[in-house]
Image: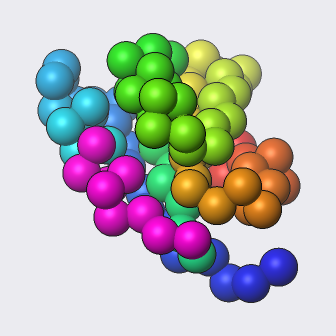
C-alpha cells in the first residue's frame, strides 16, 4: 500500500456545529492518497450521511471509552479497517 496522508480532527471538545464544519472542509481536501480521521464523543450521523451521499468510503467504530473513530476516504482501494486498527 502507498503512503497515505492522514487529515486528523479531534472533535471531542468541540461544540456543534464546529465538528461538522471542520469535517466537511477536510473532506473537500481529500484526494486519492489521503483519508480523514476524526475522533468524536458521539457518532456524527449528519457527517456520515453527507459523506455517503458523495460516495465516500466510511468506517465508524466506537471504542471501549465511548469515543467514536470515523475514517473517510475517496479511494475505494484503501482498506479503512486496516487504518482504524492503527488509530483505535
Q: Main secondary structure of the magenta part?
A: helix
Residue 66 horizontal/vertical position (percent): 59, 17
Task: Tell me if residue 59 is in the magenta stretch.
Answer: no
Q: Is residue 23 left or right of residue 18?
A: right
Q: Is residue 4 above or below residue 10?
A: below
Residue 2, x across and y down, in percent: 74, 84
Marks counted in the figure total 0
Give the magenta range. 24-32
Residue 40 drawn above or below residue 74: above
> Toward which corner of the image does residue 17 lie, by quadrant?
top left
Q: Is there any visible trace of residue 41 in the rendered image?
A: no
Q: Is residue 49 visible?
A: yes
Residue with the most extreme bottom position: 2
What is the quadrant of residue 32 in the picture? bottom right
Q: Is residue 63 left or right of residue 36?
A: right
Scheme of colours in the image: rainbow
Q: Residue at horizontal 74%, vertical 61%?
A: 78
- Residue depicted at x 67% and y 36%: 59
Q: Is residue 51 left or right of residue 22?
A: right
User: On screen, 25 above or below 20?
Assistant: below
Q: Position of residue 41 (x, y in %)?
A: 44, 21
Q: Nearer the viewer, residue 77 or 88?
A: 77
Residue at the spot 56% in from the left edge and 56% down from the top edge: 74
Magenta run includes residue 31: yes
Question: Could you tell me which quadrant the N terminus lies in?
Answer: bottom right
Q: Nearer the viewer, residue 67 or 29?
A: 29
Give x and y (percent) for residue 61.
69, 28
Amino acid at each position: 500500500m502507498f503512503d497515505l496522508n492522514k487529515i486528523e480532527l479531534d472533535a471531542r471538545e468541540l461544540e456543534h456545529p464546529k465538528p461538522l464544519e471542520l469535517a466537511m472542509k477536510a473532506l473537500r481536501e481529500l484526494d486519492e492518497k489521503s483519508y480523514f480521521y476524526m475522533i468524536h464523543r458521539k457518532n456524527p450521523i449528519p457527517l456520515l450521511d453527507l459523506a455517503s451521499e458523495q460516495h465516500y468510503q466510511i468506517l465508524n467504530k466506537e471504542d471501549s471509552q465511548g469515543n467514536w473513530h470515523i475514517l473517510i476516504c475517496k479511494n475505494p482501494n484503501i482498506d479503512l479497517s486496516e487504518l482504524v486498527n492503527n488509530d483505535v
